[in-house]
Amino acid sequence: MPSFLLTVVLGIYPIGWAMRYMFYDYKGYGAERYIGLDNFARVLRDGEFWQSVVNTFAYAGGKLALSIPLALLLAVLLNRGLRGRHVLRAVFFMPTIISSAVMAVVFFAIFNAYNGVLNQFLLKYKLIGGAVDWLGVDHAMLTVVLVSVWGAVGNYMLLFLAGLQNIPADVYESASLDGANKLQQFRYVTLPMLGPVSQMIVMLAIINALKGYESIMVLTDGGPVGKTNVMFLYVYKLFFPTAGTGAASQVQEIGYGSAVAFVTAVIVGAVTVLYFYGSKQMNRYA
Amino acid sequence: MRTIGKTALWAFLLAAALLTLFPILVTLLGSFKTNAELTAGATILPTSWQLSNYAEAWRQANFSAYTMNSLFVAAASTIGILLVSSMAAYVADRMTFAGKRLYIGMQAFTMFVAIGAVVLRPQFELMIKLRLQDTLWGVVLILVSAHASAFFILLSFMSGIPRELDEAALIDGCSRGRTFVKIVLPLLAPGLGVCALFAFRGAWNEYLLPFVFTLSKPELQTLTVGLASLKYGVSAASQTHLMMAGACLSIVPILVAYVFANKSFMQMSAGAIKG
């Protein structure tokens, strides 16, 4: 059973490992000291961490608010007999197959304030007065969200399409016989029948949005001044402080990092559960 | 009224398609521009097509090594994932054994519970114990261990193969191993194909794992890692053309595969929610 062995050793064991170090003061070298719940007390006082939680929710909220409606709209438009719909679907899905790290490098070249492609374009056509610092303090979060939306819409479009195709055509027929126009059909037929599927898609999107940090790491590395620092990036930096820009701004904090990771896992879990029950309630009253 | 609606619809769809393709086009076209032209911006097509960008990236910026490393990691982990998960799916579907439910539960657990970077550290320390921390085999091994999604895909394909076929082989005196290789694997081929596509894409695009493992070994970096490190370099601004060429090296192979097999790519992602 090689599969069993690999799963246990490389999948389960590390989780147990982290569970243990939550209660220790361990910086990657020297002695490890049992300190009970002190790490968790420190999490509560850690302003930088809670700022990253706020950032995560801003990031996830922005990403969801843009990508889900857009994906649904595209899915509805491309569901029925439109010429060239297969090509368009393939185009919209394309970003999801490309490495997010590679695209982050490309987007860095596009959004760069001084010689970025976007600014040059906007300046040439006089759409903006001066260069906009897309990755600066004011716009970094917006840029990061846009990049993530670019990478995510295609995937959710496809999932919505799969859901739409499960709605039988005769339901629409009888609706139009009863005199419902396209908009009414969408409101009273498509949306309710898509309910369970969209519930799952949104759940998936929430989890993905909360835990995505790879492209943020390459694009802004959490900066400027922590504006785009999300929870998982914060955890990562506690474990690998020298990685990234090469500036060793922090010390390695394995014990504390494990505790923070546990708290983030609990937060993600809590959001998921809350959403799950919340949407169930909504279904009941809808 | 109808034509107006149609025009608006198409305008919207084309605008969206253009926005989607824009970054990819910037990369493809940018990879042929000189650095001066890139930083001056404002041209769409390159004024002269610079193939030398690729030559420079390939020779001086070490992209030949990066490409080889990426190929190695992607190929080795794809083979590993296919081997491990096909055997696991066969056994989990056709046999009963103690702890089977626990095993399947663990697979699902590793897929859904993500605690992020935390697991990288113990994984890294395990690789030090195995003396694999300085090779890409460590990366491969960890990628292979994350085979839960391939396992579940193959499990659903497995249940679509009639039991009678391999049971007949067993009754005829064929051993378990031979039955698996001669009967089950060929029938599983479509599933294996999709899994291979996914495993290869995943490994080829992986960033964090090879990044952490090659912090002290720049010559082992994969395309994604090498590319991102260009961005952090001191001379980043003077190397935009190399970034673009490097990004193309990473994007184009996957893009070509996508053009030929976009149905399978999309089917699989959609299947994830239906199943």
Image: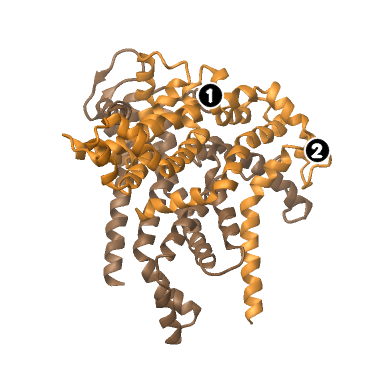
Chain colours: A brown, B orange
Closest to the observer, B264 or A17: B264
Q: Is residue A195 above or below residue B207?
A: below
Q: What SS does tag 2 mark? A: loop
Which residue is most to the front? B172
Label placed on residue A247: 1
At x 31% / y 20%, what residue is drawn? A26
The amino acid at mark 1 is Ala
| Position in image of residue B127 (x %, y %) | 38, 18
Crowding at label 1, few (<14), some or many (≥20) Cα neighbours within 10 Å?
few
Residue B53 horizontal side relative to residue A134, left or right: right
Q: Is residue B54 above or below residue A145?
A: above
| Position in image of residue B216 (x %, y %) | 51, 17
Q: What SS does tag 1 mark? A: loop
| Position in image of residue A87 (x %, y %) | 60, 57
Label placed on residue B49: 2
What is the chain identity of the residue bearing mark 2? B
Q: Is residue A251 above or below residue B183?
A: above
Q: Is residue A88 above or below residue B131?
A: below
Residue A70 visible? The answer is: yes
Q: Nearer the viewer, mark 2 or mark 1?
A: 2
At x 24% / y 41%, what residue is drawn? B167
Residue A50 visible? The answer is: no
What is the chain identity of the residue bearing mark 1? A
At x 42% / y 52%, what residue is drawn? A205
Which quarter of the picture shows residue B232?
A: top right
